[in-house]
Image (tube, grey):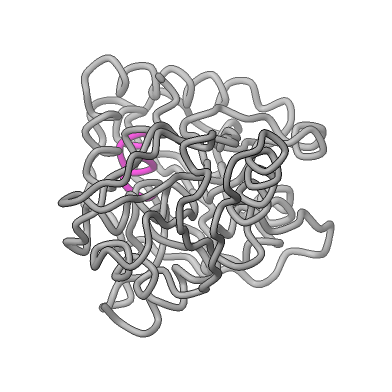
């Protein structure tokens, strides 16, 4: 695993970045990141999209695995990239990814440099006021235990009382675990033995070695390690503290919004959606759950 990839995993989800209303930064367009071909005639055309035959997808150039990131070759990859390609193909369009920094994504869309944002964008009221969303994924927090010797942990509950765990620093996982530990002691049970480490690979190694009972981080990160790095871990219980991620289109662009929603429904019904999530360790974050 490259140092850049490790660094990306440490930073946490880019979707947690704050929305700012700054002028859009210069965007980088990449048209050779996809081999997906349209499945048939285009189902949407200008002015609903910027360019006939092409779906321009805004993607964050500072994203994190497994949703979207740059691999060792510099190619843009991830579950949201694969979903974007599949959605474009189902709509009879070729995908073209327009990269920008996360805070500039919505301004870039509003400046009409892309048609839709697919970039770990959490669906929040302040964002729904300026864009329309088609939900396609959840983000959440998860608990990883050893696959060979799993601890008796069922989720963010009293099963954590007295357990030794590691949490990523300054994350939702840390605050939720601290709150759970307080619940444990209030009920007369042992506190959670909370350790902090910003390095996911180091923390998960300690889980596999039996030095700690569990590691808590984003469910996305844990799924990535379980499916793409060979880590011998498994999720304990289901992701919690979830929030929806959506494809964002310009406010009022009903034609494109409905076309994306229809294409997603087709991908869900034909199995493409679940297959894609499974490849990136995100089955538990399916919008169909």
Left or right of residue 261: residue 270? left
The quarter of the picture where residue 153 lies is top left
Left or right of residue 72: residue 200? right
Q: Position of residue 56 (x, y in %)?
A: 49, 48
Identify the residue shown where x is 45% and y is 75%.
Answer: 199
Q: Position of residue 45 (x, y in %)?
A: 49, 30
Identify the residue shown where x is 53% and y is 34%.
Answer: 158
Q: Position of residue 261 (x, y in %)?
A: 48, 21
In the rendered view, would you say 106 is above or below 247?
A: below
Left or right of residue 24: residue 161? left
The quarter of the picture where residue 186 lies is top right
Front residue (pair 107, 125): 125
In the rendered view, would you say 108 is above or below 134?
A: below
Identify the residue shown where x is 62% and y is 56%.
Answer: 174
For the N terminus, give its image quadrant: bottom left
Left or right of residue 215: residue 178? right
What is the span of residues highlighted in magenta in the rendered image?
81-88
The quarter of the picture where residue 97 lies is bottom left
Front residue (pair 288, 84): 288
Residue 85 included in the magenta stretch of the image: yes
Q: Residue furthest bottom?
A: 3
Identify the residue shown where x is 29% and y is 35%.
Answer: 89
Q: Position of residue 171 (x, y in %)?
A: 63, 58
Front residue (pair 104, 112): 104
For the C terminus, give its image quadrant: top left
Front residue (pair 165, 16): 165
The kind of secondary structure the magenta stretch mainly shows is helix
């Amino acid at each position: 695993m490259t140092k850049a990839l490790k660094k990306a995993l440490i930073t946490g989800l880019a979707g947690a970045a704050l929305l700012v209303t700054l002028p859009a930064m210069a965007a980088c367009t990449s048209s050779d990141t996809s081999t997906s071909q349209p499945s048939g005639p285009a189902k949407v055309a200008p002015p609903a999209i910027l360019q006939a035959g092409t779906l321009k997808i805004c993607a964050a150039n500072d994203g994190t695995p497994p949703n979207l990131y740059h691999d060792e070759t510099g190619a843009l990859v991830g579950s949201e990239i694969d979903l974007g390609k599949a959605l474009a193909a189902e709509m009879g369009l070729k995908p073209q990814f327009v990269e920008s920094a996360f805070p500039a994504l919505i301004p870039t869309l509003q400046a009409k440099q892309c048609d839709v944002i697919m970039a770990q964008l959490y669906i929040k009221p302040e964002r729904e006021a300026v864009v329309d969303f088609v939900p396609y994924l959840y983000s959440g927090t998860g608990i990883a235990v050893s696959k060979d010797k799993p601890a008796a942990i069922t989720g963010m509950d009293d099963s954590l009382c007295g357990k030794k765990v590691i949490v990523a620093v300054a994350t939702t996982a840390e605050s939720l675990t601290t709150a759970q530990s307080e619940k444990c002691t209030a009920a007369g049970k042992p506190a959670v033995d909370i350790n902090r480490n910003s390095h996911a690979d180091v923390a998960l190694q300690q889980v596999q070695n039996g030095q700690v009972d569990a590691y808590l981080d984003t469910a996305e990160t844990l799924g990535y390690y379980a499916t793409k790095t060979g880590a011998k871990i498994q999720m304990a219980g289901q992701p919690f503290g979830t929030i929806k991620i959506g494809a964002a289109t310009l406010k009022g662009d009903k034609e494109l919004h409905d076309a994306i929603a229809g294409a997603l429904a087709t991908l869900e019904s034909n199995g493409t959606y679940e297959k894609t999530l499974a490849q990136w360790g995100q089955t538990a974050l399916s919008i169909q759950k």
